[in-house]
Amino acid sequence: MGIKLLIVDDSHVVHAMVEKSFAMAGVEFERIHHAYNGQEGLAILAEEPVDLVLSDIHMPVMDGVEMIETMKRDPALTSIPVVIISTEGSKKRIDHLIQIGIADFIRKPFTPEKLKDLISLWIGA
Amino acid sequence: MDLQRQELLEATLITVLEQFAFLFADLVEKDEIEVEESEFAMVSLSFTGDFSGQLVLATPSSSCVEIAANVLGTDPSNPKAQEDAQDAMQELANVCCGHILTAIAGDEPVFDLGVPSFGILSLEEWNSLYQDPETLVFIVEDFPLLLRWTDTRAS
């Protein structure tokens, strides 16, 4: 069975960059879902749980923090690893994200190798 | 602008452009460039926190497409690159601003970044930004890119 990924970011360019980077790193997915805010992300997860979520923090409608907090309250979603991909550089804010349950944090810009390492670490593929 | 601030902005922009878009930039003197274009794209991004300020990036509109193409790993003639040109500039501003703030203030302070605002500049507006003493001029591959950073902490 292949890996199912959900990308949550309000920038279409970031979606394309993530997909391109995974392709460059030789990582293949059964399916990649795309959401452009936390609310859309939760709607996709309600239909089809995934193996890994890559999410931005600052997004319109619903930000990444609210999406993660909602996931952590839902027994069906709480175990899905969420990795934040953001420009955030504040230690205090990253510590808060760890407290609410993110699996990992990657600062933009990212490399294909970094994304590949994520898959090894959180999916074991 | 003092030399230390200029070097910090120069080093950060060059690193971010290289990692984000695989583009190589050099800081140049203001009398070293001439532009033939008449339309320019500008992104501005404000931030608040321990101190507040604004980042402005500007480049000829056609160069936005080149940036997007590089980011997406495609050709500038690809409609996707043209469609995503504005988004690529906004994301570049976002990444630049985050990294410049860390370079200036370290990782302890918390800053809130606004939404990058995209606009079109006339040649006159471009020249005004270009002449601003706070504006740094870069040549990215073969096109000019202006960076203006202002903050309430700047000396």
Image (cartoon, coloured by chain):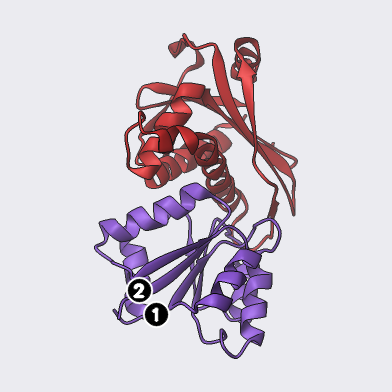
Q: Is residue B147 above or below residue B54?
A: above
Q: Which chain is purple?
A: A
Chain to which the residue tagged by mark 1 belongs: A
Task: Output the letter for the chain in red.
Answer: B
Q: Residue at x 36, y 38 (%)?
A: B70
Three-letter residue code for mark 2: Ile
Q: Is residue A111 visible?
A: no
At x 51% / y 25%, what residue is drawn? B59
Circle 2 SS class: helix
Q: Nearer the viewer, residue B150 or A110?
A: A110
Q: Residues within 10 Å of mark 2 (few under 14, many from 20)?
A: some
Quarter of the image where the N terminus of chain A is located: bottom left
Give x and y (percent) for residue B5.
Answer: 57, 37
Whether pointer 2 and pointer 1 mark residues with C-beta atoms closer than 8 Å, the reply is yes
The residue that appears at 51% across and 23% down in the rendered structure is: B61
SS category of the residue bearing label 1: helix
Point out residue A78 in the picture as x, y percentages from the top left corner.
Answer: 57, 86
Q: Position of residue B105 (x, y in %)?
A: 63, 53
Identify the residue under disc 2.
Answer: A119
Quadrant of the rendered structure where residue A59 is? bottom right
| Disc 1 packing (10 Å; few <14; some 14–19; many ≥20) | some
Disc 2: host chain: A
- Alpha-carbon span between mark 2 and mark 1: 5 Å
Residue at figure coordinates x 54%, y 35% from the top left: B86
Q: Residue B85 appears at what percent x and percent y?
A: 49, 35
**What is the count of numbered marks?**
2
Q: Which residue is mark 1?
A: A122
